[in-house]
Amino acid sequence: MVGQIIGGDYGEIWIRQRSDAMVEIGELLIANDFLLQVFDLEYGSLLEPRDLARMSGMQLEGMGAVNVKEKNIRNYILVKAKPVFDLKNKTLPKALPGFFNILRNVKEEDFKFLKKDDSGIYLGKVRSGSKVLNIPLYLEGKEVLRHHILIPATTGRGKSNLMKVMLWSLIGKNYAGILVLDAHNEYYSYTKNAKKYGLKEHPDAKNNVMYYTPNPQGEGYTLKINIQNVRPHHLKEIMEFTSAQEDAMYLAYREWKSKWIEEILKGNIPRGITNEVTMAVLQRKIQVALELVVSESGDIIPQGNIFSAGDVGKRTIKDIVEQLDDGKIIILDTSTMSKDLEILIASMIMSEIFEKHKRCKEGRANNCIFEELPVVSVVLEEAPRVLGGDKSNIFKTIAREGRKFNVGMIAITQLPSMIPREIMANLNTKLILGNETKGERDAIISSAPQDLTKDSKMIASLEKGEAIVSSIFTKFAVPVKIDLFEDVVDESRHLTEENRKRERIKPLF
Ligand SMILES: Nc1ncnc2c1ncn2[C@@H]1O[C@H](COP(=O)(O)OP(=O)(O)O)[C@@H](O)[C@H]1O
Ligand SMILES: [Mg+2]
C-alpha cells in the first residue's frame, strides 16, 4: 500500500502518499486494474500556509521546534499520476479507478500481457521509476524496423549502447538486414577492462556480422568503392550543382554509362555540352568529392582511402546489398572518412536496396519474392544532417515510403527538433533517452505515438540507459532500463561456457 486516490481528473489523478512510502517520478502504480504512472510530486498540508511559515520561523530562529500534532496526517506528499493502461481490458483506460482507491506497487505478474517474444528486438527490462523489474521487453522486429525508429538523446545518455543491445539481439535472425555507419568504430570490436566486446563476440557473428573498413588489419573486408558505381544522383546527395552542371552529368552518364566519371576527368566533353567552363568546374567538383586526381598522362589516381579506379572495389556495393538482403548486419567503419563521404556511401547502398525492393514488390524483378525479402534498415547517427533541410534525398524517401518496400531507418540524434515534423511523424517507434533541453523534449513529445504531454519532467530526469518506449506497437509508453551492452556480452559468454561444461560432463551412454 503506497497511497490513496483523493481527487484530480482523468489526466491528473491526485494520490496522497503514505508517509513511509517513497514514490518516485516515473514510477508505476496499480489501482484496481489500472496501471498509473507518476509524473509529478508536490507537498500537501492540511495546515494553512501562514501557520506553516510561522512554525518554521520559530524553529529556524531558535524559539524551539513546534511540535505538529499528528504530523504524518497533517503533512503529506501529493503524487500526481496519469492512467496509462487498463490491465483488465488491455486497452487505454477509458474510466477512472474508483475514488479513494488504495494503490500498490507493481509486481512482475502485472506485466503478463507483455508477450516474451525472443524473436523480436530486445531492449532491456521494464522499470518503475528507477526500480528495474525482471520483465524483459522485446519489440516485434520486422514491423518495428519497417516503420522506422528514432533514438533521441543528449550525448552520453546511452544511444550507442542501446543500438548495440538491439543489434546484438538481431544477429542471426534473418528477417532483418541492418546497415550501420559506425563513425566511432565502436560497434564491431573493442576492449574494455582487458576484455573483448563488440558485436563480433556474438556466438553467431561469424556468418551474420560483416565488418568493412578502409584498411583491414587481418579482420574484415576492404571498404573500397569503385568510381564506376557512382551515379549522378549519388553526388547530388552531398553537393550542390548548378542546373548546367547537372545536365552535363546526366548527359555524360547517358553517353558513357559507368565510365562517365573517368571520361569527364580525362577532359572529354559529352555530346550536347558546349560550355567548357561548366565541364572544368564539374571536373574539379568531382575530383574533390571523390578524392581523386588525374595525372599528366590522364590516369586517375585515388587520393583518399575509399574511392578506387580501375578494377578495385567494383563489387563492394553489390556484395553489401546482397548481404543486407540476406538478413545480415553490416558495419561500415566510417571513422576515417569525411561526413560527406559517409553519407555518399550510405546513399549508394540504400538507393540500391530501395530500388531493388521496389522492383521486386512491383513484380519488375526476376527471381525475387517480395515476402521473402528481409526488412533492411540503416542506422544513421546525427540524423538531421540528412533528414533536415528541404533537399530531397534517399533517406527522406525511405522515411516517407520505405515501409511499403520493407526498407527502414533508425535515426539517432541529439537534436530531434531539427527533423521536420512530417518526417518525425513517420518514425513510429521512439526510444526516448534522457534529454535536458526543453525544446528538444517538446519536439519528441509532440510527435510521440502516446500522449506524453505530462512527461517532460520525467524525460529530463532519466538516468543513463533509462528510456521510454513510445511506439505504435506498444500499448502504452513503456519505461525500460536498457541493458548495459557489456553485461549482455558477459552473460552470453557465461551461458556458452555453461553449455560447454554440460557437454563435457555428459555421460557417454
Ligand atoms: N543502459 C545503460 N546502463 C548503464 N550504463 C550505460 C547504459 N548506456 C550507457 N551507459 C554508460 O554511458 C556511457 C555512454 O553511453 P553511450 O551509449 O556511448 O552514449 P551516447 O551514444 O548517447 O553518447 C557508456 O560508456 C556507459 O558507461
Ligand atoms: Mg554514441
Image (spheres, rainbow, N blue to C red):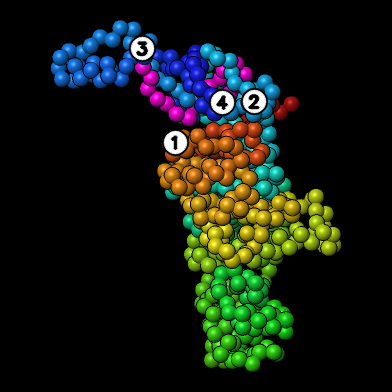
Three-letter amino acid code of the residue under disc 2: Lys
Give the mark, 1 or 3, whose residue is nearer the N terminus: 3
Residue type at mark 4 is Tyr
For image coordinates 23% across by 16% down, the residue present is 55
Q: From the viewer's perspective, tell me whether residue 363 is left or right of residue 79.
A: right
Q: Secondary structure at mark 1?
A: helix
What is the x, y in percent for residue 170?
A: 64, 44
Q: Earlier in the sequence, mark 2 or mark 1?
A: 2
Residue drawn at 67 percent across, 47 percent down: 147
| Dot label at residue 74 | 3
**Tag 3: residue type?**
Arg
Q: Secondary structure at mark 3?
A: helix
Which stretch appears magenta? 29-45
Rendered image: mark on residue 10: 4
State how far apart marks 4 and 2 are (Cα): 9 Å
Where is residue 401 shown, x and y percent of the image? 70, 55
Which quadrant does the C terminus fall into? top right
Numbered disc in front, either 4 or 1: 4
Q: Which of marks 3 and 4 precedes in the sequence?
A: 4
